[in-house]
Amino acid sequence: MNTKIIIAGVGGQGILLASDILCEVAMKSGLDAKKSEVHGMSQRGGDVVSHVIFGDKVYSPLISYEEADVILAFEQVEALRNLDYLKSDGVIIVNKAKILPVPVASGLADYPKDPIGEVKKFAKNTIVIDAEEIAKELGNSRVMNVVLLGVMAKNVRSIDKNIWIETLKESVPQKTIDVNVKAFERGYSYS
Amino acid sequence: MKEILSGNEAVARGAFEGGLHFACAYPGTPSTEILENMAKYKEIHSQWSVNEKTALETALGASFGGMRALVAMKHVGLNVAADPLFSAGYIGAKGGFVIITADDPGMHSSQNEQDNRNYARAAKIPMLEPSDSQEAKEFTKLALTMSEEFDTPVLLRLTTRISHSKSIVELAERETIEVKGYEKNVKKNLVMPAHARVLHKKVEERLLKLKELSNDFKYNFIEYKNKNVGIITSGISYQYVKEAMPDASVLKIGLTWPLPERLIREFAEKVDKLYVVEENDPFIETEVKAMGIKITGKEIIPIVGELNTRIVKESFKVIEPYKLKETSEKSPGRPPALCPGCPHSSVFYAINKLKLIATGDIGCYTLGALPPLNAMDTCVDMGASITNAIGLEYALKGRDKRKIVAVIGDSTFFHSGITGLIDLVYNKGTSTVIILDNSITAMTGHQENPGTGKTLMGEDTPKFDLVNLVKGLGIEDVYTVDTYDLDAVTNLIKRETERDKPSVIIARRPCILLPEMKKKKFDRYEIDEAKCTGCQMCVKLGCPAISFDKEKKKAHINETLCVGCSLCFQICKFGAIKKVKGE
């Protein structure tokens, strides 16, 4: 069986780096891997979704409804937006970040009162984390995405943890390796 | 060696391995990264063209000179380049000549969902269609050799999910190909009627030979499984079919035009029921039906939008249609928006305030059409802002007092605004044209253009002076204005639209996302809640950094998003927005 993971959030949150690392990790584990996302309009403050699939043989680069083993949402309403993709026994990881879409900011729409509560009503396995707070504790708020990657790694059992660390080290700037590894570990041990 | 590459990266790699000498393109989603990646290979000369027509003609010129040449564009770009495409079909190729069209089923970033396989049939040019990154790389190489062998341009069709999906690719070394050199050959390269009549016959003969090739082509193949159901498919749809219908027999087509008739007949005879799964138009379906073969396609497969595994399963009734979860709260839409500090915002704020009719164009600034700015009436295609204004102005004359302003970006103006502006002067139009000059091609992710003074390969080149260019086109009244000065922008647009004389306003300020702009230090702004009356005038700017708290009835400026453009400060009549010294 292939593993199907959706990473969702808002442009600028580091989603593409996270999904690139995930794909690389899968390839290094000797698996077939594909990922799909849409660039373009979505870069102007729109929502960003990346689908990553790996296993013995991957055909479609897209994940359909009720197929995702893990959904990693960098933002609360993006968790809610992608809920239909989650398998009935899948895990959804929700970062507590709240980024107002422009229609909400300008008063044309409302931000849901409790998106996480709503997600919990439908998903059996929900992990809620304030990754930004953890990143700040580590002294670099930009490693928020790596904290989240750590939480996800813990929930993707088919891949060896060492391969994650090795790939992470290769994917980030030299001088930020330490803080990124720490961020990954904090996410990995989060429960 | 193996690498994970996007389809676009794989095309660039394939071109490199296939000994390509020359590549050009005009940026357009989802094709842009092809040339951006091509430029990383120093063995290939890569350049941005001014539009897709000039690009195709330029690449053909390199092929005349005996170079292996490639041109890339998005699907609608091929409309712009359609004129030379058809001629190139007759002329053929001395050096291998590949034309890439990146279609956008689902219209993630496009104004229509046209299916460019139709161009292959219409222009009588072979078309290859990869279904993952490995094939994207192989097919690019194959297209180069096929082009030389059959003396024809070769179309390579990608779609968004091929261009922007990543999968594992096995890499190879670059093949060294000698440049063949130029030889004068007017009977082939000069398509006047007497020559073209002879060439057309050759084109028809070439198609017959290609059709024969198609039957034995390695990438047109059958995977027999259960013979109750046989599915013909190509491109990304192949992946969805393999996943949705793992037990079906499949005829996978890599050379979409001309289709392998003999192979299709063989497959049709062996399976009980024949289907075709393809995105958008019933292209294969129409051809198979014309062969007199019974096949089911668009009767069950949607014609609008992208496909995916689930849609294929639902179409074959393998599963029931999915019912969305009934959550009591829904996620609000998150449409793209102009960035905080976008230099275009003030122009749209002014257009909205002045209640002008704005004929728009294609670029980031198309987002000025969205609420709360609502400052664009039309958007048709690259360059249409100016020419739409000419016709609309004539239609309104004596019937409607509203004033028209055409809004176009700098790169779009170079692409196809210049001829429109000549048209406006020639036909005595009086509309005002605003050129939003942010010194870059922004929407597609910052590509150089004739206004930036740099080439794709990073060399210095003459920088076009828009003022002199516009004056040279016959516009006497040309003004430049800093878009961070809201009063100056508003007053200038008001004055110029009220006058019955054509004029051009160059609204100038570099894109806020350019690296040199990001480095600049700035003072940011915040709301003085005691003074904020909740009038929401600042909210109408559509700045993502400004939000309105409905309960407190106060505006709020997000301190991490604010880049200190000061436009909201200029708008506020109550002095409720104050400057905070930058660090």
Image (cartoon, rainbow, N blue to C red):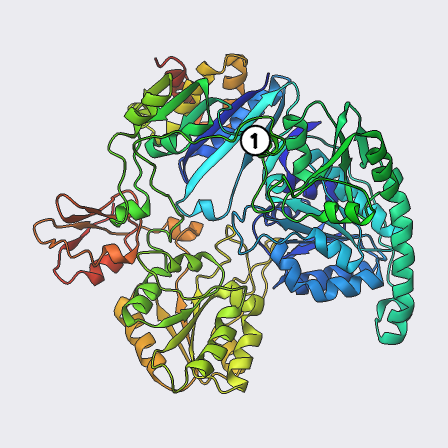
Residue at screen point 66% across, 49% down: B281
Secondary structure beneath label 1: helix
Query: x, y percentage for residue B366?
Result: 44, 59
Viewer-closest of B326 and B481: B326
In the figure, B144 relative to B484: above or below? above
Q: Is residue A74 visible?
A: no
Residue situated in front as seen by the camera: A87 or B138? A87
Which of the 4 image quarters holds residue B353?
Answer: bottom left
Q: Amino acid at mark 1?
A: Arg
Q: Quadrant of the N terminus of chain B?
A: top right
Report x, y in % for residue A178.
42, 21
Which residue matches tag 1?
B310
Q: Is residue B79 left or right of residue B437?
A: right
Could you say which is closer to the camera, residue A113 or residue B44? A113
Q: Residue at x 55, y 57 (%)?
A: B448
Residue B413 appears in the figure: yes
Q: Quadrant of residue B97?
A: bottom right
**Closer to the camera, A131 or B123?**
B123
Circle 1 residues within 10 Å: few <14, some 14–19, many ≥20: many
Chain containing mark 1: B
In the picture, which quadrant includes the C terminus of chain B? Answer: top left
| Left or right of B297 in this view: A142 | left
Rendered position, B106 above or below B389: above
- Drawn side of residue A60 relative to residue B186, left or right: left
